[in-house]
Image: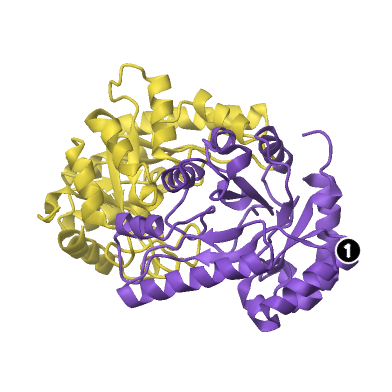
Chain colours: A yellow, B purple
Amino acid sequence: MDSPPEPELLSLNTATVREKWSLRQMIEGCARHRIRGISPWRDKLAEMGVKEAAKAIRDNGLTVTGLCRGGMFPAADRKARRAAIDDNLRAIDDAATLEAKCLVLVSGGLPPGSKDLAGARGMVRDGHPMYCADRACVNTLAQALDLCDELNRNGSGALGVAVDVYHVWWDPLLRAQIERAGDKRLLAFHICDWLVPTADLLTDRGMMGDGIIDLPLLRSWMEQAGYHGFHEVEILSSRNWWRRDPDEVLATCRMRHRTVC
Amino acid sequence: MDSPPEPELLSLNTATVREKWSLRQMIEGCARHRIRGISPWRDKLAEMGVKEAAKAIRDNGLTVTGLCRGGMFPAADRKARRAAIDDNLRAIDDAATLEAKCLVLVSGGLPPGSKDLAGARGMVRDGHPMYCADRACVNTLAQALDLCDELNRNGSGALGVAVDVYHVWWDPLLRAQIERAGDKRLLAFHICDWLVPTADLLTDRGMMGDGIIDLPLLRSWMEQAGYHGFHEVEILSSRNWWRRDPDEVLATCRMRHRTVC
């Protein structure tokens, strides 16, 4: 907790600069700013082409810390449900092509018109959710780990959680559940900050240091539990960071990572 | 779950019509719309005067289902902390004068400039929180009940929770924790709805039936756990219900209570 994080553990979740850059620009930007990890989103990946992207990432010596995203399993009818599952199978192929450390799933929420939360949670279980949930009917780390245990009893590390500080910082059981997860199930660590006030439920995340999350404390819990992987910055910020020059954003990420994380 | 709720169990949390009415108008409005319960807020109570309000409420035959609110315990320094505690002592006096069924506490969040969540939670415990938490460092029903057990071991009913559907509907442990609370600790049941999308974190609550919460299911869990008290409508809605004629709002509350709760 007292020593700053290793700079080479910084990773860029490309949502952070999604408004102004293509995936190729993101890859080259990471290399330029000596950010060693990258986590692409599938819309930009489709634009560039998966093989082309894999080559550019390899050529620049980057590690793919995650592919965003699969999931969104609950659906209103059989056809939509089948489409969601097929899309997840394609996402697994893409993740393999990119040699991604993990495929991040956002489980999905209630289907349109539904109030059946138990039913939606059942669809997520049947769809094999893997990672931590946002805008989702899997809402706590404990619940995500229960699902991991149910679907992957031997704890091989094939299923696990992406611990995103934005979603879990408030959880009274957080420290215990990170410890429970252990190194096998801790597949990713996403960082940003919770702003006060927060103006939008989805796209008003803060840069590390601008909010109220005790990032060094959370990192220390991750490390004590055996996680020594990347620290992936993911900042959805329609009002601020998305509007800035991405080179400025990346430089700020590096500086804040060193000083407040 | 199949039978509609008893109309005489409807209660009005006066925040629902706070923009246009004084407390006296709220009291008379409840009587006019045959709403038998009322839950005043302290700012309006101070305007009217506590004794005057108690008399008007009594004269109109209303039950005070709760007084909103005490709490907000975490503070940045000793002086602010002392002021918060004094304010809570006054709130207890007011609740007694009104013969309120309970005093609703909102525990409070991080003090300005602080990231010390564990410390804030300690200040809440020391301040004796009672009821469910909003914008607060007590975030789940399980955590609130743990505090109740710690501070009121004999489960006398002096401490308990206000189950506000807006705050708890997503909780994977909800049914089990309502059952755990039982009739002694279930002191209030607040209803409204969660809108999709939600435009504001605080003041975009929905009227019952306009969102995605399965209200009859949650009510059935409360009843199975032994709760047979009022159903208190609390709708903070700067964009919609606060702008309407309060008589229309109350009529809508009554109709929706009968048809979708």
Q: Residue A44's spot in the image, x, y percent?
A: 40, 49
- B176 or A148, which is in the foreground? B176
Q: Residue B72's spot in the image, x, y percent?
A: 46, 66
Q: Quadrant of the N terminus of chain B?
A: top right
Q: In this view, which residue lies farthest toward the left?
A: A3
Q: In this view, which residue lies farthest toward the bottom?
A: B47
Please give the residue where the numbered disc 1 appears in the rendered image.
B33
Q: Residue B15's spot in the image, x, y percent?
A: 67, 68
- Above or below for B103 versus B75: above
- Above or below for B171 versus B19: above
Q: Is residue B114 left or right of residue B144?
A: left
Q: Chain of mark 1?
A: B
Q: Quadrant of the C terminus of chain B?
A: top right
Task: Inspect the image, locate mark 1, and give the three-letter code of the amino acid beneath it.
Answer: His
State the residue at coordinates (37%, 76%).
Answer: B80
State the residue at coordinates (27%, 49%).
Answer: A232
Quadrant position of residue A146:
top left
- Above or below for A138 versus B19: above
State the residue at coordinates (81%, 65%).
Answer: B249
Q: Residue B98's spot in the image, x, y percent?
A: 69, 67
- B217 or A132, which is in the foreground? B217
Quadrant position of residue B235:
bottom right
Q: Classify mark 1: helix, strand or loop.
A: loop
- Numbered marks: total: 1
State the residue at coordinates (62%, 57%).
Answer: B102
State whether residue B176 appears in this view. yes
- A101 or A114, which is in the foreground? A114
